[in-house]
Every structure is written in C-alpha cells, then in structure tokens.
Image (cartoon, helix red, strand yellow):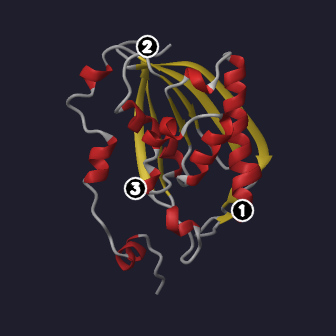
C-alpha cells in the first residue's frame, strides 16, 4: 500500500455558442491528498450507483458536446445522486440528521438544493458547498471543490456526506469525518472563497476568442 496519493478533479467545460449549457459551463480544478497519516478528515464509507443513461455526450470529432436537455435532470442526475445517497445511508445505518454537511455535484445551484430537500437535508447543510453560484459548473472538479469549501468551515467531529455525479451515468457517495487538527492546518492556506474573491471578470468577446469559439 502507498503512503499517500494525489486525487485531482479538473475540467474545462464549454457549450456551443447560444446553447443553454454555455451559461453555466466553466473551468476549474481541485486536488486532494489521500493518505494514511497526518490527515484532517477520514473517508469512512463509499458507495457507487451506475446505469446506462446517456444524458450527455460528445461525438468523435465534434467540437461541442450534446445533451438531452431536461433529460439531464431526471432520470439522469436526480436518480443517480439520490440512489447513491440513499444506498450509503442505508448501508451505514445513518440518516440526514447524522450529517453536519452534504456536498453534491453542482451543475447549477438548483439541482443540489432540490436533491437535498428530497433526501431530507436542510439547505443550511448544503449551501456552504455551493461554489457553483460564483464559478459555474466545473464538471469533474465540481463536488471536490464543494468538499474543499465545506472543509474550510467544518470543525473536528463534523460528518460530511458527499455525492459526485458523472454523465453516462453514475454517482459515487462518501461519508467523511472531520478530524482533530483541521483548524491549525488551514490557518495559513488560501480558502476556496479567497480564490473566488480574487476573480477577474472577462467579457464575452475575450472569452470566445480565448476558447477558440470564433472560427475564421
């Protein structure tokens, strides 16, 4: 067994000009060190739920992805995230009351809040993770950035339920316990909110040029 590993979630998403997807698509990355010592939180249990549900795809050679519109919500996102959460709570004999925070994949802010309500979590338990409100949908980095934002405010002993989502479709669920020493470790490191506050706004013409959306 290795002593430590580096888990990275990163994506640079974009939609076809004028597509509704373009409104929320963004770029971002998050890295987490997973090891067996000197840790600030422990992963206690994991659970996965997958089906063959092609809600989002990109054909070979296509510049932009295609999606199923409303189909991306139900039965894609909501079904998989909800089932993964329900399965892990059943298998760990826990309920929403046992968790201090919950983190979902964030294609927008509406989906996580609706899922939290359906599962029985208060919005106060999910809102600290909603970086999507400021940075958009970072795809593969989304739930990891949400977890990082939650760890920025969590205290030792807090329990976190985290559920990711990937089109195709599948969700991974994790139960996490915050450990002693987290307050000391985060004193001198930037928080997710610090990165958000350091943002630079770009106009649409600069964005389209930078992303190569303008073809001559």
Question: Contact (CB < 8 A) between labels 3 and 2?
Answer: no
The residue most toward the bottom is 216
Of label 3 and label 1, which has the lower sequence position?
1
Disc 1 is placed on an element classified as helix
> Is residue 163 left or right of 124 when viewed as pictured?
right
Image coordinates of residue 9 in percent, x first then y, are 48, 42
Q: Residue furthest left?
A: 188
Give the camera-side residue of 48 and 107: 107
Location of residue 105 with respect to 132 vertically, above or below: above
Q: Which mark is on residue 70?
A: 1
Residue 53: x and y, percent? 77, 50
Vertical placement of residue 174 versus 211, above or below? above
Residue 168 visible to the viewer = no
- Name the mark nearer the viewer: 1 or 2: 1
Please report whichever mark, 1 or 2, sits nearer to the chain's N-terminal start.
2
Q: Residue at x 45, y 21 (%)?
A: 158
Q: Depth check: 154 or 182 in front?
A: 154
Residue 95 pos. (x, y %): 64, 23
Label 3, label 2: how far apart the Cα atoms are = 33 Å
Picture quadrant of residue 61 = bottom right
The span from disc 3 to disc 1 (Cα, nearest Å) is 23 Å
Asked if labels 2 and 1 touch by Cβ distance under 8 angstroms, the answer is: no
Task: Determine the residue positioned at 43% across, 48% down.
Answer: 131
Q: Residue at x 68, y 15 (%)?
A: 93
Label 2, residues with CA under 10 Å away: few <14, some 14-19, many ≥20: few
Kindly identify which numbered label has been placed on residue 134: 3
Q: Which numbered marker is on residue 36?
A: 2
């Amino acid at each position: 067994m290795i002593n430590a590993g580096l888990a990275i979630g990163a994506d640079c998403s974009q939609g076809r000009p004028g597509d509704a997807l373009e409104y929320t698509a963004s770029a971002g990355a998050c890295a987490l060190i997973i090891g067996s010592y000197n840790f600030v939180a422990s992963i206690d249990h994991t659970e996965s739920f997958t089906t063959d549900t092609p809600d989002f795809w990109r054909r070979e050679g296509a510049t932009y992805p295609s999606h199923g519109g409303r189909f991306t919500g139900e039965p894609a996102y909501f079904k998989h995230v909800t089932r993964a959460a329900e399965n892990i709570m059943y298998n760990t004999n826990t309920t929403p009351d046992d968790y201090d925070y919950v983190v979902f994949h964030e294609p927008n802010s509406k989906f996580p809040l609706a899922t939290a309500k359906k599962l029985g979590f208060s919005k106060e338990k999910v809102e600290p993770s909603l970086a999507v409100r400021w940075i958009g949908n970072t795809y593969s980095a989304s739930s990891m950035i949400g977890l990082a934002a939650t760890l920025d405010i969590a205290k030792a002993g807090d329990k976190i339920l985290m559920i990711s989502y990937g089109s195709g479709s599948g969700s991974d669920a994790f139960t996490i316990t915050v450990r002693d020493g987290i307050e000391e470790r985060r004193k001198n490191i930037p928080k997710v909110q610090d990165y958000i506050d350091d943002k630079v706004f770009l106009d649409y013409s600069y964005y389209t040029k930078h992303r190569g959306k303008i073809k001559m």
